[in-house]
Image (spheres, rainbow, N blue to C red):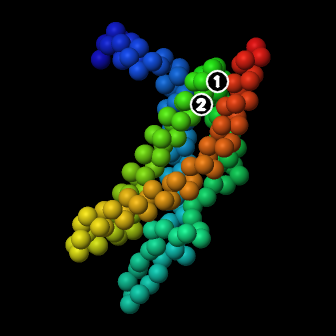
Amino acid sequence: MSLNKMKVILERIGEDKIDLSAIFAWVAVFSFLSIFRYVSFYAAESHFIYIDNVKLVRPYSSFEGPSFRDLDLVIFFFSGLIGGLALRDFEKILFGLAKASLLSLLTGVTYASFYIWFILGFKEFAEVNFLVAFEFTVFYALLNFVRMLPISLIPCMVGAIIAGFLMGAV
């Protein structure tokens, strides 16, 4: 792809290179930490149930689930601060966070759906009814990541707003 075509694409979507790189950096940070905490939560042996020597797992629980550690929240805050400094405009910061949260939610739900389907063994339920098994797989993945997304957005938004005010004062 030539440089002129890339400029035309960026002009059509209304973003420049720094804005897109900040948004995709947020997506990478949100997605990586969310997926890491999701996998580390469900890889623990305490979530498996043994019935007749068959290992089963609950893909979703309403009273416990993957959560972020303190270091993760600090990483979210500093990523918001750096992204806010890169975007420089309060409107771009808010819309950039909205774009990043939706893209990271989509990435996380897709990964978790594959994880539930293949690793946790929901593909075996597809022999009975494929559509119901697929629907519950995506539903459980969505429930897990919808519960994690606001906790990751709050420190990132605080850091981005602080950076926006700093850039507005300069």
- 3 and 84: which one is in front? 84
Pick the quarter of the image with the C terminus.
top right
Pick the quarter of the image with the N terminus.
top left
- 132 and 16: which one is in front? 132
Per the image, the residue denoted by label 1 is: 90
Amino acid type, mark 2: Leu
Question: Secondary structure under badge 2?
Answer: helix
Q: Residue 61: x percent and y percent?
A: 52, 70
Amino acid type, mark 1: Phe
Q: Residue furthest bottom?
A: 52
Residue visible at 52% across and 53% down in the picture: 146
**Above/below status of 57 relative to 68:** below
Q: Alpha carbon of mark 2 to alpha carbon of mark 1: how far? A: 6 Å
Residue visible at 67% across and 55% down in the picture: 69
2 and 1 marks in contact (CB < 8 Å): yes
Q: Quadrant of residue 162?
A: top right
User: Dot 1: few (<14), some (14–19), or many (≥20) neighbours within 10 Å?
Assistant: some
Q: Quadrant of residue 158?
A: top right
Determine whether, in the image, residue 147 is placed left or right of residue 1.
right
Q: Mark number for residue 137?
A: none
User: Dot 2: few (<14), some (14–19), or many (≥20) neighbours within 10 Å?
Assistant: some
Q: Quadrant of residue 11?
A: top left
**Above/below status of 137 relative to 157:** below
Q: Residue 97: x percent and y percent?
A: 56, 34
Question: Secondary structure under badge 1?
Answer: helix
Per the image, the residue denoted by label 2 is: 94
